[in-house]
Amino acid sequence: MQGKVIFGNAHVDGSKHWGWFIGHFITPTNNPRSTSDVEVKWMNHKAGDVRKDWAVNAEATTLSLLIRGQFRLQFLDKEVLLSSEGDYVIWSPGVSHCWVAESDSTVLTVRWPSKPGDSVAMTPVK
């Protein structure tokens, strides 16, 4: 038996979900992009785009990979600047973060597993 083959554009397909184009939130559920195993996001950020509110995931591990530009992520105990194509950062569940695009940037983010309500805004405590 042969499986499904689908194709598309990550930027277009993620436009309804803040850039996320694979994950539990995709409908219909028989779509191969609908999965609770992983979430994948393709995002083009303009210079100055910022997530000022801190967020944390209870269960998911996150990988952010720079495709182009300069993108800064802030964690409670460190700051990471992604500045060369291929630079990445991985953080564990329970790690608070926020970010800013220092120049026009494209970032691919992968989060696993994909669970409703796992990412929440929070006030960091240092």
Image: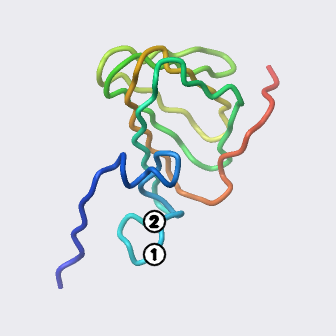
Three-letter code for the amino acid on which mark 2 is drawn: Thr
Q: Is residue 81 left or right of residue 78?
A: left
The residue singled out by tag 2 in the image is 35
The residue singled out by tag 1 in the image is 28
The image quarter containing residue 124 is: top right
Residue at (39%, 37%) from the top-left corner?
108
| Structural crowding at the residue carrying mark 2, measured as other residues with C-alpha within 10 Å and reported as few (<14), some (14–19) or many (≥20) | some
Image quarter (top left, top right, bottom left or bottom right) of the N terminus: bottom left
Residue pushed farthest bottom? 1
Number of marks present in the image shown: 2
| Vertical relation: 50 (above or below) 14 | above
Mark earlier in primary sequence (1, 2): 1
Residue at (29%, 51%) from the top-left corner?
9
| Vertical relation: 124 (above or below) 110 | above
Three-letter code for the amino acid on which mark 1 is drawn: Pro
| Vertical relation: 70 (above or below) 18 | above
Horizontal and vertical percent position of residue 42: 39, 41
Horizontal and vertical percent position of residue 38: 45, 55
The image quarter containing residue 110 is: top left
Of 12 and 98, which appears nearest the observer? 12
Look at the numbered disc 2 and give the secondary structure of its residue. Answer: loop
In this view, the mark in front (1 or 2): 1
Tell me how far mark 1 sits from mark 2, CA to CA: 11 Å
Horizontal and vertical percent position of residue 17: 52, 52
Image quarter (top left, top right, bottom left or bottom right) of the C terminus: top right
| Vertical relation: 122 (above or below) 47 | below
